[in-house]
Image: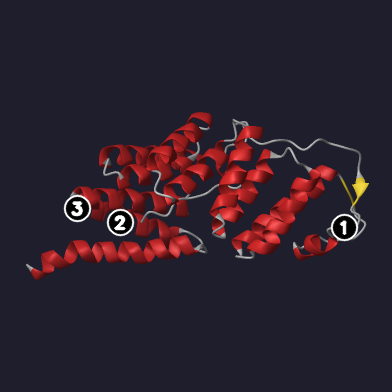
Amino acid sequence: MNARISLSQDNLRSLRPTFLKGGRTQASRRGAQPLSRSPRKQSASRSGVTRQAVWLEPSEQDRLLRQRSLSLARQGNFIDAIDGLNLLLERNPLSAVDYNNRGLVYFQSGQFASALHDYDHAIRLNPRLASAYNNRANYYAAQGCLTEALADYEMAIDLDPTNVRAWINQGITFRELEEYSQAIENFDHALQITLLLSNGSTSVLEAHIFGARGRTHHLSGDWNYAIADYHRALDRFADADAIESSASHRLLAQIDGWIDDLITPAIDA
């Protein structure tokens, strides 16, 4: 299981407690204006933006368009998602957050060169945007550039020590390098942070961490620890209200297969 987790503005906000600063560029607050038609009305309309004359602050218009674009990306509608983010960047050309988000959508749609360009530009605009380093590290890892990936994950963690996904992703990279002890240490940190921020409630993210740590124990030969973590992951999935992401479904199937790999030799013996 080498699937790494990317960060958009939406899912980053859900992880960070409210008392921590967010590393994102704030749109300037101008006077309230109605939504009006623009030369890009066709692409904006495809992005799901309602073109009624509704009185909204420009920053609120941007927030709604950003949410809509990221929602379209989650549904696999990458073309319309990019259209919406293009419009945002026309209106806010210095927005590191929107370059990072567009880079994420480019990456998800397989346009890797465009993704790297946007991640680099986001970091130039805001060198403290932790999610952009995490996402660029995912790009490097996908290209097999694991040293560069580790450095960017480390920067993301330095900027935001509660960045659970960066801890997990870096742990996966350590595992690929067969640095199993370091990988397990990363997963332990990720689990501690997740438990701290979840206020005792079970999360699917915990299941992913237990699955990743279990796989690391498995590969390092600690099979008893592996079985225990696999079952912890399955228990977290069972307790979760819903499993909607394809990554979660893949992990469930993988864990079942990994458990079979561990117990079948014992049965055959």
State the quadrant of the N terminus. Answer: bottom left
Q: Is residue 232 left or right of residue 93?
A: left
Query: How many badges with numbers are in the image?
Result: 3
Q: Residue at x 62, y 60 (%)?
A: 73
Q: Judge by depth and name the residue closer to the eye, 34 or 144.
A: 144
Return the x and y of residue 8 as percentages of the image width and height.
60, 48
Q: Judge by depth and name the residue closer to the eye, 154 or 83.
A: 83
Q: Residues within 10 Å of mark 3 (few under 14, many from 20)?
A: some
Return the x and y of residue 142 as percentages of the image width and height.
44, 51
Look at mark 1 in the image and give the residue it sits on.
39
Residue 202 appears in view: no
Under mark 3, the amino acid is Trp
Q: Residue at x 35, y 51 (%)?
A: 212
State the quadrant of the C terminus. Answer: bottom left
Residue lying at the far left of the rendered structure: 269
Q: Judge by depth and name the residue closer to the eye, 106 or 163.
A: 106
Under mark 1, the amino acid is Pro
The mark closer to the camera, 1 or 3, is 1
Look at mark 3 in the image and give the residue it sits on.
223
Badge 3 element: helix
Q: In the rendered structure, are the residues bearing label 2 and label 1 in contact, judged by CB atoms less than 8 Å apart?
A: no
The mark closer to the camera, 2 or 1, is 1
Badge 1 element: loop
Look at mark 2 in the image and give the residue it sits on.
230
Return the x and y of residue 65 as percentages of the image width and height.
75, 53
| Up-down relation of residue 150 to residue 142 (above or below) | above
Q: Residue at x 50, y 38 (%)?
A: 163
Badge 2 element: helix
